[in-house]
Amino acid sequence: MTIAEELRRERAAARASAGVRDVRELRGIDELDSLDQLDLLDWETDPWDEATEAGSVERLRVQTRSIKWLAFTALILLNALVLLAGAVGWWYLGRINPAGEASEPASFTVQAADTVESISERLENGGWITDAAVFGFYVDRHGGLELTPGYYEIARDDHMGNVLARLRTPPGQTYTKVTLIEGLTVAEMAVRLDNSIVPMSVAGFDAAVANPTITSALRPPGVTSLEGLLFPDTYQVSNAENEGQIISRMIGQMERVANQEDLIAGAQRLGRTPYEILIIASMIEEEASTEDDRLKISRVIHNRLDIDMELAIDAAVRYGTVQQGLDPNTIPFSQQRQTPGPWNTYQNDGLPPTPITNPGRAAIHAALNPAPDPGLGDPICFGLRTADCRYLYYVLADDEGNHVFAATGEQHNANVDAARAAGLLD
């Protein structure tokens, strides 16, 4: 018998003598008389209570971990895309609807050759919109735009939707492009506008020309005519403009060109007034067809004025005939030349009282910059002193409008005979 068995017997005997039930006869903890008997209760050994070896945990397969990393990466990318989309959207909204208040509407012109791309660039350059590319995209996303030429009133820095709405609305003012070429008289301009623009008429133009409130800074006191003061150019005339407004625009354009050509200082350098230079320019406009001839004819006019010699400008005589209400094409020029009048430069010394047409920039430039006189090496100076060799005469040299110039009457008469023989003169 083992020591443990002996100890159990002794404990059982002690309990029996004390009247305590043998705990071995008890069927469980519920039948114990006291907690003191708990130590006497024999427990059966459960094989699950004793671990014979350490347990192990199965590791996740590599495939499962890859899926988790992919999901994590996708989540990060998704968040980045959301943030990027938000930033782009915020930027896009800022381009569509700029911060701050829109300005007062300003005039914007849509021309016949314009496209959405071309007006987008001009709208951006002019401050109406902030981004031409975004505006083009916005137009495409909102049904496109069919352009109608005309004048539009559009607020700067306004919502692009408002700009688009303005451009879709028929313009309050449509325009007609009309070209007034160099050399037209005031009366001829009136006819051109009457034929080109429905609301305008010759009578309305004549009334506006006679209006004393429409004047020019280049017109001297006492002169009432606007001849020579209306700049010939291509104008876009709106259907809302009247004759007086277009005349004012032409006057303003002539004043701008005069400033660009430095008319006042140039006239003073030549000993003339600005208005006299315009008179000279108007005669050059009618007489010359090429740049070289314009400069030389300018020199002829200045030379003749310097020596008090009649100008003998045929175009001025014909203009005088028109001012008398006659048609110069139905009257022989020899007869016109014999008819007295303020524009008869064969009978009167000096300049005519007004320009005879409306000169362009080239003629004004020539009037301010006459060609130098020929040098002694020039054939027309043969046998003449330097002081006597100057351009004083000219006549047509060919049917292309070129002229031949002379320093003496004899040279000029020879040139006239040659021109008449070639059928260039009446």
Image (cartoon, rainbow, N blue to C red):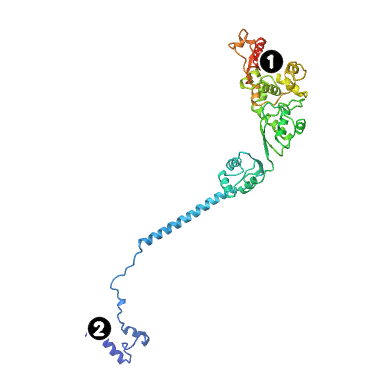
The kind of residue on which mark 2 rests is Ala
Q: Quadrant of residue 21?
A: bottom left
For the residues labelled 1 and 2, the Cα–Cα distance comes to 159 Å
Q: In the orientation shown, which residue stands out farthest toward the left?
A: 1
Upstream in the sequence, badge 1 or badge 2? Answer: 2
The kind of residue on which mark 1 rests is Arg
Asked whether the viewer can see residue 154, the reply is: yes
Q: Is residue 111 left or right of residue 16?
A: right
Rendered-image quadrant of the C terminus? top right
Q: Pinpoint residue 162: horizontal percent, then vertical percent.
A: 63, 48
Q: Pinpoint residue 93: horizontal percent, then vertical percent.
A: 57, 50
Rendered-image quadrant of the N terminus? bottom left
Q: Residue at x 64, y 22 (%)?
A: 289
Residue to which mark 1 is pinned? 304
Residue to which mark 2 is pinned? 4
Q: Is residue 381 left or right of residue 325?
A: left
Reply above or below: 338 against 87. Answer: above
Determine whether the residue tagged by mark 1 lies in a helix, strand or loop: helix
Reply above or below: 90 against 66. Answer: above
Q: Is residue 15 left or right of residue 201?
A: left
Q: Which mark is residue 327?
A: none
Asked whether the viewer can see residue 95, the reply is: no
Q: Residue at x 75, y 27 (%)?
A: 225
Reply above or below: 97 against 414. Answer: below
Q: Pinpoint residue 205: horizontal percent, then vertical percent.
A: 75, 32
Q: Nearer the viewer, residue 271 or 287?
A: 287
Determine whether the residue tagged by mark 2 lies in a helix, strand or loop: helix
Q: Pinpoint residue 263: horizontal percent, then vertical percent.
A: 66, 25
Q: Nearer the viewer, residue 212 or 16?
A: 212
Mark 1 or 2: in front is 1
Q: How many circles with numbers are drawn on the protein?
A: 2
